[in-house]
Amino acid sequence: MVGSTSIAARAVQGGVSVGSVAGDVHFTYEGMPPDHGYPGLALSAVSMPLAGPQRRVPQDRLRGREALVDELTRVLSQRTSGADGVWLLAGMGGCGKTTVALEVAHRLIGVRRQVWWVPGAESEGLSAALRSVAYAAGAVPSDLVGMHPADVLWRRLEALTTPWLLVLDNVDDPAVLAAAPSRTREGRGWLRPPPHLNGAVLVTSREARTERWGSWVTSFDIEPLSSGDGAQVLRDLAPDAGSERDAQELAEYLGGLPLALDLAGTYLARIAHDPWPSPSAPSTFVAYQHSLGGRLEDMASDPDTDLAPAERSRRAIVSTWELSLDLLDRQGADLARPLLRLLSAFGPAPIPYQDLFDLDLLAGSSLFPDLTFSRLQEALRSLTGLKLVNVETTSDTRDGGGGDPLRWITIHPMVRAASRAHPAFTEQTSSMLRLVSGLLHEFTSPWDVADPAQWPKWRAIAAHGSAALLLHALERGDGIAAADLVVTATETAVRTALYRLHVGMFGESVSQLRAARDARARLLGAEDPATIGAGLALAWALRSAGDLVESDKLYRQLATVCERSLPADHPYLRRRRGGTACRARPSAARSEGRIAKHPAHPVRPGPNGIQPRAPRRGSH
């Protein structure tokens, strides 16, 4: 009902027309081509880098994993008719699953002509990457008309005659590989057994249960390293930090977890090369274990020996990287700690930091006092030097053309999770929220979601579109937040969802828009223009996804809200034949304001690392 007048709705091109005896309420979503669901997309607009990262452990230092890597390389290169073609590496976080998969993938590059590497930590990014695999395997946009993208992917993979390997890394929830209403174990979604012997799939995951993956998946359990192998990892990195026995005791104390061993050994190696180390900094295996033990006691009142292995490993990770950050503080890289927390605040995907990190916004945040470009560079070098983050280079370029290669920061999922779980992260959530929202807003505000030429940029940031939205959910307090911050914190989520709608990722778009609409409704109220804007975007996404019933229902609700709550001169409304018309555009869901940029601090350009961007003062 609109007032006391009954209404009827009908779908029209570009929107839904809702007619009443008083006039018409027309919702017309502008900027969306009517055939966007079957995008005539340039392949570069939706393709993603699919090459595997470089080895993180030299071939001659695969301690305790040599036999497993050899066996996997053999079975994947010489697949027989008795194997179903899907292998799973399962184990707790930080146990070295990705290291094993990387080594196998590199060894098979010469055997299997196509090796595709797909990160799976972020479900929406995983879906986009698998679409990119389909295009790389020969799909064309018209293939997607009337077919599920998973069917398109496997039809193309099955047609290949050359050997290929698909690696799905860090897929901790098998459900993200399902195609509703089927389940992953049924083998009808994104993960299926390759029907021909020239194809193989390798998956890494914390989930090991056969009932979730399917009996057709061959599983290998990745266990922690023995004390002997763990000691060798430590001595490879820090050969002068103590005896073999001391290294074994530290390796056992760290639970044989390769990630913790790597962090500890790298720390001790850095101490060994420090010309003037602090007397309180542990420089031997024994001293490191003693310091680690003190931190673990502070983290838990219960005896550490009573903890489950996974929890003990998590606390070991937290303690090892806190020791590393303490070292960086003492060495003058005091911005390394807030930088790591900021990086952990973004999504679980590679971060295009060179263009995303606006120096003005960083300098204006309380998280980065007295920031200069050289100090930020030193913080990043220090984090990479202690292996808390990795900087990787892809074949993409920063300007989408022939410019400098695009660099990404990646963080191990365990380090990211431990950083987000730290009490200091929670205490700083409010400041982090404002900074992340501002960085994402400043980075994406000049882009048009409807311009195919800018889709590669959206693709690079899409996995982080909901980062501020998730931070808002973590923020403590009474639930009352400044309206401008609420809108800005949800804006990038709305706009990345609209980008996904344009490239045909309907399910992901609907999910993201629904979360943004709900967050605005909860914090601003259902009748706030920003909430209405997100609702209009959601209604159009539902229509594009084929859910005309729910879309029609939502349009009716929005007609009521618009008529009741908005002033006559609001951009969403116009008078027409005595009635009212409500118009939504992609920009309507965006903030009318923006987080003010702070006065610039002096920064200096660097040769290859983070490049300070020129402020885009006139882009809004």
Image (cartoon, rainbow, N blue to C red):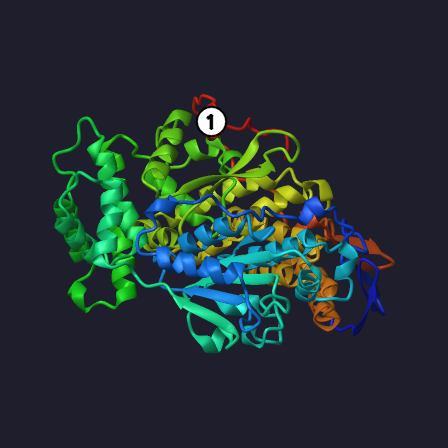
Residue nearer the viewer, 18 or 283 = 283
Residue at 51%, 76% in the rendered image: 214
Quadrant hosting residue 535: bottom right
Q: Which amino acid does label 1 sit on?
A: Pro
Vertical comparison of 279 with 116: above or below: above
Question: Mark 1 packing: few (<14 Cα in 10 Å), some, or many (20+)?
Answer: few
Visible in this render: residue 479?
A: yes
Q: Is residue 391 left or right of residue 557?
A: left
Q: Left of 75 or right of it: where is 555? A: right
Between residues 122 and 397, which one lies in front from this camera angle?
397
Q: Residue at x 69, y 44 (%)?
A: 44
Q: Where is residue 422 in the image (x, y as percent from the top left)?
A: 31, 53
Quarter of the rendering containing residue 432: top left
> For the residue labelled by badge 1, is the local secondary structure a helix, a strand or a loop?
loop
Q: In this view, does 35 lie to the left or right of 421?
A: right
Asked if 45 appears above or below 505 in the picture, the reply is above
Q: Position of residue 155 (x, y in %)?
A: 70, 64
Q: Which quadrant, please, contains the C terminus?
A: top right
The residue beneath circle 1 is 599
Which image quadrant: the N terminus? Answer: bottom right
Q: In this view, does 240 lie to the left or right of 355?
A: left
Report x, y in % for residue 255: 24, 59
